[in-house]
Image (spheres, rainbow, N blue to C red):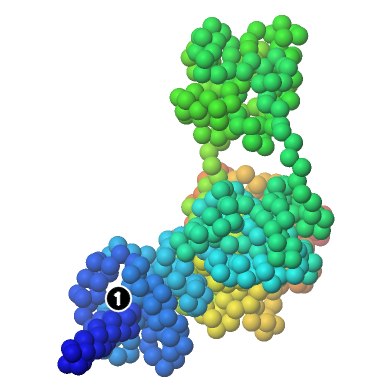
Amino acid sequence: MKHFNTIFFLLLAFEINIYLTKDTKNAVVDNIYDIKEFKKLIRTKTNVLVCYTNSIKQASQVIKVFREAADVIKGQGTMVVMDCSGEAKKVCKKLKVTPDPFIFKHYKNGEFNRDYDRKFTVSSMVNFMRDPTGDLPWEEDASASDIVHVPDAETLAKFIRQESRPLMVMFYAPWCGFCKTLKPEYVAAAKELKGHSVLAAIDVNKPENAVIRTLYNITGFPTLLYYKNGAMKFQYEGDNKRQAIVNFMKNPSKPVKVKEQEWSEVDSEVVHLTTTNFDPVVKEEASLLVMFYAPWCGHCKKIKPEYEKAAAKLKSDGIPGMMAAVDATKEVSIADRFSVKGYPTMKYFTYGEHKFDINLREATKIVEFMKNPKEPPPPPPPEKPWSEEESSVVHLNEENFKSFLKKKRHALVIFYAPWCGHCKKAKPEFTKAAEFFKDDPKVEFAAVDCTTYQGVCSAHEVSGYPTIKYFSYLNKVVKAYNSGRTADDFIAFMSDPEGNGSSQKTIVPQLTDANFEEEISSKSAVLVMFYAPWCKQCKEIKPEYQKATNELKQDGFIAQLASVDCSSNPVVTDKYDIGTFPTFKLFLNGKFAADFTGKSTKDDIKSFVVDVKNRKNKEL
């Protein structure tokens, strides 16, 4: 028996040793020395994050965090450390990777996906590896720093129990459209309520947080619950707007639920259709407008009185036609039949045939339409993305941001959102300034669309639009640009970004077929340089021409230097018989005065303009 016990404990110790060895196995793949093995790895593993470094010592802290993240993400992704100063040097060279001292690159399904551009923390790396193609998690968004981001159920329970101030918790899912709409309002409310109350949020879409839905009875997103002294008082059901949330938190009260009367029960001239009567009614009517709606839809509630008013007007004025409505949440089969995707949707029918949809919201316009039903014109094409427009602005993304700026001595970067009004206003000015510097290899103007590349913008603490920053060799100098947003302002700044006191530049206006006559007529003296983009001599003369512009302005001389790109302005080019490039012509009070054929130096250009103008003035 004693012998048996000894064997049993030896076997038990052996099993424990195997288990511990297995459990403590390094989760990180260290150094792959053969390029074929590396390609095999990223081909066979679908989610790979590689830390390339040229100094293990300098990157030691980041690598430590990297290893901790690898332990958490084990089984969901593969994390690799490559020492490009050691035995993995050849692989790094073939991959053209130059870490300084480290760089993270992600590979998905055998191909490069993107550079890692988030925080170097365990939670950020884990979030990234769980969704490497997704949006930046809300808790990592710098603009949402006033929100308390709760990671899990245990922390949430403890937080609710210990928080003495009034507390609201938003339960959300990253994919939820209503959540995305609410987020900026919730952030703004949190900022305003700082010191008075607390706004928190938790992502219940994470697998580890699935239990929260049951514990807190979360059946839809977003759900906002109000707590006081550790106890849930009631659910917030007010408007999803900053001011409404602020008002509620300062004076919380239980919502009074009033049962809303169904629209079909309201006495009006609108005919309510169901599965039973839809087809017979629609087939009989020569002119029928049907509004598909949802009772909870805010836009539907807003249009209801206008729709009823229009229906009453049709009847009172004897206008032929019928106006009907369908509750799409009840009559799902009818809504599906006509591919109703949003609310309200208005469809026009003639004797049972669906002709087209309309998008009218006012009673008067609906009545006008029913008097003379015509298919509306197609909507205007969507606005062309800035990145698809031809300009000298370089558009950066997650893949090229660092590599591009690392090589640039002076770069001005605008972080923008396409919907932002201030961005739209700054865009043409920024583009003009970029055009001005297009032949200067030391200066670049770049742009980042923060709605598409959130990671880049978050990494550079962009919290509003537009945010404009100056970069010199990426990280050597980074500073905020806080000057004006005209082309002249951008040019003046980039002419002396280091503040060495060099003279400010004034932009040389680009004249076109459309504005040429108007511009030269509005100035007493204008010297125009006619050029072609491919002309080498034109490029060489531009700096002298620019200097002459600056000095004439500084001397207080009322004259302007301008230019015309003859490759895109044939009318002006033909009118003034431009055959060689560059050609200079001086205009006084809108009329041609003289050709400039002297040396293309700053002083000669200035002297010519001043001499001709003074001579003409004496003749007058």
Residue shown at 63%/57% (left/top)?
170
- Residue farthest toward the front in the current orientation of the protein: 1
Q: Where does residue 51 sit, x and y in percent of width and height?
A: 38, 79
Residue 374 shows in the view: no
Residue shown at 73%/40% (left/top)?
257
Residue shown at 73%/25% (left/top)?
306
CA neighbours of label 1 inside 10 A, class few (<14), some (14 to 19), many (20+): few
Which of the pair 159/347 is nearer the observer?
Answer: 159
Task: Tell me: 240 left or right of 39.
Answer: right
Q: How many marks?
A: 1
Q: Quadrant of the C terminus?
A: bottom right
Q: Quadrant of the N terminus?
A: bottom left
Residue shown at 74%/14% (left/top)?
313
Q: Where does residue 224 sit, x and y in percent of width and height?
A: 66, 54
Element under disc 1: loop
In the displayed structure, 56 sits above or below 238; it is below
Q: Where does residue 333 sit, x and y in percent of width and height?
A: 47, 25
Which of the pair 213/481 is nearer the observer?
Answer: 213
Task: Tell me: 83 left or right of 564.
Answer: left
Residue type, mark 1 in image? Leu
Which of the pair 568/461 is nearer the observer?
Answer: 461
Residue 24 shows in the view: yes
Which of the pair 139/136 is nearer the observer?
Answer: 139
Give the residue number, with chain letter if any, for mark 1: 95
**Image quadrant where residue 139 sits:** bottom right
Q: Where does residue 119 sit, x and y in percent of width and height?
A: 52, 75
Task: Tell me: 283 left or right of 44.
Answer: right
Task: Tell me: 532 left or right of 290.
Answer: left
